[in-house]
Every structure is written in C-alpha cells, then in structure tokens.
Image: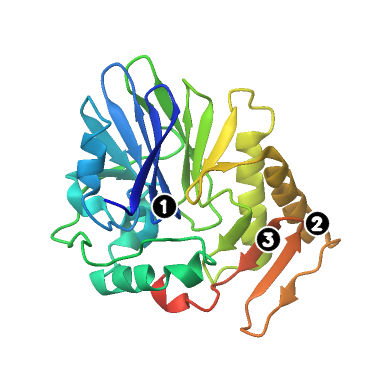
Amino acid sequence: MIFYKTIPLAENTWQINEFGFDAMYYLEGEKSGILIDTGVGAGDFRGVLNEISTKPFIVAATHGHLDHMGGVYLFDKIYASNQAYRLFKGCTDHIRRMYINELQNISEGFSSNETTDFLIRSDKMPEHIAIDSTSVIDLGGRTVTVFETPGHTTGCLSFLDSKTGFLFSGDAIMSRLLFADDDADKMERLHLWHSSITKVLHGNTKIKAVYAGHFGRLPSSAIKELLSLAEGIQDGSIVIDVDEEGSTSASLGRAKIRFGWPSYTVLYST
C-alpha cells in the first residue's frame, strides 16, 4: 500500500513508515522477531510485515497513543507497559480517523497519502503482556532490552537492540518533545524525563543510534540540544513561554519541549 514504506536499516532490521510520519520497526533474530509499534493502523499492516518477516514475532508498544498502538487489532498479544495498555483502551475508531484527517497539521506538512479508507477496525483488544525495565526479550542470538523512559506519557518504554546498538525510543526522545499529561506538574515531569533519559544514554556505549517514533534516526547533535534544553529549563537559564493557545513551551536550536497539547488536543486523551 502506498501509505506504507519499508526501509532496511541493517541486517534483519527494518523501519516501516506510515504516511511518511509514523515510524515502526521490525527486528528479527535466529528464532523470532519483534515489531516495535503498530502505527495508527491505516491498512493491511500485517501484509507489509509478511513481506519481510521469516519467523514468528511478538508485537510491542513504546506507549499508548493511537499513532503507536492503533494497529494492535491485527494481533493476538501486545507487549506494553500497564499504563500504555490502559491508555489505549480508551481510543475509538472515530478518534483514529480524526488523527489521519488531521495529519497534515500534526506532522507540520510532512505526511503524505493520507487515507482512512482501509483503517483497521477494532474488534477486540489483544491480550496484554506487561513489560518494564526488568524485561529482556530474547530473539535468538539477539536480545532487546527494555527501558522505562516516562515523560511524554507515564508509560513510555524504549527498546535497545543488542545486535545493532539501535535504541528505539518511540516519542520519548524527539527533537520536538511533547509532555502530554496536562494535569502533571511541569517541572516534576521534566525532571522525571531528564533523569530517566540520561540514565539510559549517558555512559551506555552499547547505544550506537537513536530511532524515534516519527521520521526515524535522530542526529546526535539534536539529542544533545534536547538534553541541554531540558537542563536549561530546570536551572532557569531558559524561559518557558506561553503561546496564544495557552500551552507552554521552550526551544533551543532545533529542539522544542512543549508542555500540554497544541491545537489538535481533541485527537487524544492522556
């Protein structure tokens, strides 16, 4: 389907783009594979996977937003945090359609070929397998280590592949980082995010690259800007601004941290 594009990243490692915006990842070991995130579920995602997978695989989610778990209805089980599973259970097909219809705005013009014609219908939620920072997934000659990286939502997870050194971060590490929970204290949430991310990134020589839940690989310079921005907000050297919509944000170079939803709030619950 034209709204899915598969990009090889390394041996038995693929990035799958949905509408040129949402990014999912498939890794395969000697015995099994893992799919990280499912996009919004725009169509026959299972058929796309059948073209690259050669072994049985599990499905995991970085967090519970509709553009990362919307395709879970194609599968029997989902490996995710408890918070992510609870969050996504409140998502409706109507909201998923609204997301696709608003993608030009959400993606700031980067998405393409948007259509709701083939949206995967929700029949029943897959069985939930809870994972957290104690989890290591063995694919056979290749392991995936799970890290809790809260901030964007409380249930965010990131996945480190032992074979490539790629960290798949979902929305937890992005140049334009959104803290989605409007009710949480801004500085507490920022500190929680910064402490968890620095714990994962700093001194971890196994990480060779970071791949986000939108677009793909993040330049190391962009990650440094994001961390510097968070540090500047915390020590007061960078000021948080309030825009005309009443949401608050701060920027440094290419990095931006927004607290609370922008104008398309209606598409999500937190």
Residue visible at 17% across and 62% down in the picture: 121
Of mark 2 and mark 3, the one earlier in the sequence is: 2
Residue visible at 60% across and 36% down in the picture: 200
Q: How far apart are marks 1 and 2 (CA)?
A: 27 Å
> Could you say whether the residue bearing mark 1 is in a helix, strand or loop?
loop
Q: Taking 39 as reference, is 207 left or right?
A: right
Circle 2: is it few (<14), some (14-19), or many (20+) Cα within 10 Å? some
Circle 3: is it few (<14), some (14-19), or many (20+) Cα within 10 Å? some
Q: How far apart are marks 3 and 1 (CA)?
A: 20 Å
Q: Do the residues labelled 1 and 2 touch (CB within 8 Å)?
A: no
Q: In which quarter of the image is residue 123?
A: bottom left
Q: Do the residues labelled 2 and 3 touch (CB within 8 Å)?
A: no
Quadrant in the picture for the C terminus:
bottom left
- Given the image, on which type of amino acid does mark 2 rest? Gly
Front-lying residue, 96 or 132: 96
- Given the image, on which type of amino acid does mark 1 rest? His
In the image, residue 19 above or below residue 29: below
| Labelled disc at residue 256 | 3
Point out residue 241 in the picture as x, y percentages from the top left corner: 74, 74
Q: Which colour scheme is used?
A: rainbow
Pointer 2 residue: 232
Point out residue 269 in the picture as x, y percentages from the top left corner: 40, 71
Front-lying residue, 210 or 108: 108
Q: Residue reaching furthest right?
A: 237
On the question of residue 120 being in view, the answer is: yes
In the image, residue 238 above or below residue 169: below
Q: Residue reaching furthest left?
A: 123
Pointer 1 residue: 63
> Could you say whether the residue bearing mark 2 is in a helix, strand or loop?
helix
